Image (spheres, rainbow, N blue to C red):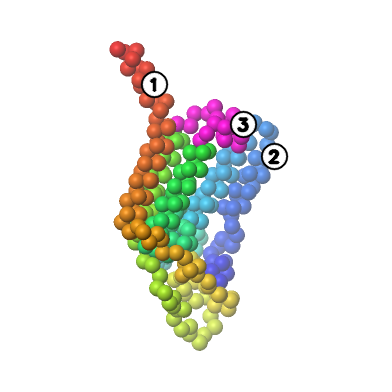
Amino acid sequence: PSIAAYTLVSNFDSDWPRKIAVLSLALAAAQAEGSAAQRYTTVGGIAFAMMILAANLGARGWYFMKWRALGQANRGRLSSFFAPITSFAVAIVTGLVFPYMGFSQIQSGGKSAVQLVVWNSFLVALLFVISDLNSVQSFIVVGSDTCNQDNTNICMGIWFAMTSITCIFAAQKIRPPSSSPSNGEDEEDKDPILVEDHSSPVGYKVPNFPDFPIDPIYYGGKGLSCCSLRAEIMFGLVVGIGVGAFVVSTGLYDYLEDFHDYVSESV
């Protein structure tokens, strides 16, 4: 129903970001190996794919955090042409700042949501540290282990610590669902093409399409019973800041070594 409503209210009836990403990667495969055109098209395709992933997480996180839709926040001043573009850009920023809030299980709220953020942030950090090993990098991309990755490690460490903190504080504000979810208000005895529905990502839905929502959050866990919410928050902050500082320190190692050599030569 939401996709059908999006097609009716928007001028963009196709997934253009995904098509651009696929086209860019296809053009990269057709270029001469090692050429500048291949590098640019590959980086462009990867960048579009990352933006699509960030927009997906950001849109879901926006909905799960129950923020007002852009049309409601701007009182409908966004036109049907610029609304998808603006929404895509805002969703990307939200996905980069609150990436873990896009997981559906985050709706369980309370300790379970905080525990989900801590576990996923730890898993992401572990995978990043493993990917930083020279043996792993040489296996994935030949020659990548010889590249200077200090600035990348510094940026990733700062981003990891920032997102861990923002998602932990955002997750604890989500209220756990009630044991008996409501089915919503009674529908009017009309047959319009579109009906307003704030639970839809686009604000409307097509009522004639079947809609059988099955919410898995009512069957999720409640978090560790042996730890309080405050203890899990403190543990998550320690893990997020600690691992982020470690990743940043790996990028600062060469800079500190150069500084130490400069001081030694000066003395």
Residue type, label 3: Val
Q: Does the stretch in magenta take in 40?
A: no
The local secondary structure at tag 1 comes to helix
Residue type, label 2: Ala
Q: Give the crowd class for mark 2: few <14, some 14-19, many >=20 residues within 10 Å.
A: few
Could you say where residue 75 lies in the image, as x and y percent from the top left? Answer: 38, 67
The local secondary structure at tag 3 comes to loop
Q: Nearer the viewer, mark 1 or mark 2?
A: 1
Residue 154 location, quadrant? top left
Label drawn at residue 142: 3
Task: For marks 1 and 2, give the CA distance.
Answer: 42 Å
Q: Which residue is mark 2?
A: 30
Taking the image as drawn, is residue 83 in sight? no
Task: For marks 3 and 2, give the CA distance.
Answer: 20 Å
Looking at the image, residue 58 lies above or below residue 1:
above
Q: Which residue is mark 1?
A: 258
What span is colored magenta in the figure?
132-150
Residue type, label 1: Asp
Looking at the image, residue 215 lies above or below residue 18:
below
Could you say where residue 94 lies in the image, as x and y percent from the top left? Answer: 42, 54
The local secondary structure at tag 2 comes to helix
For the C terminus, which image quadrant? top left
Could you say where residue 192 lies in the image, as x and y percent from the top left? Answer: 53, 80
At x 48%, y 83%, the residue is 187
Q: Give the crowd class for mark 3: few <14, some 14-19, many >=20 residues within 10 Å.
A: few
At x 39%, y 57%, the residue is 114
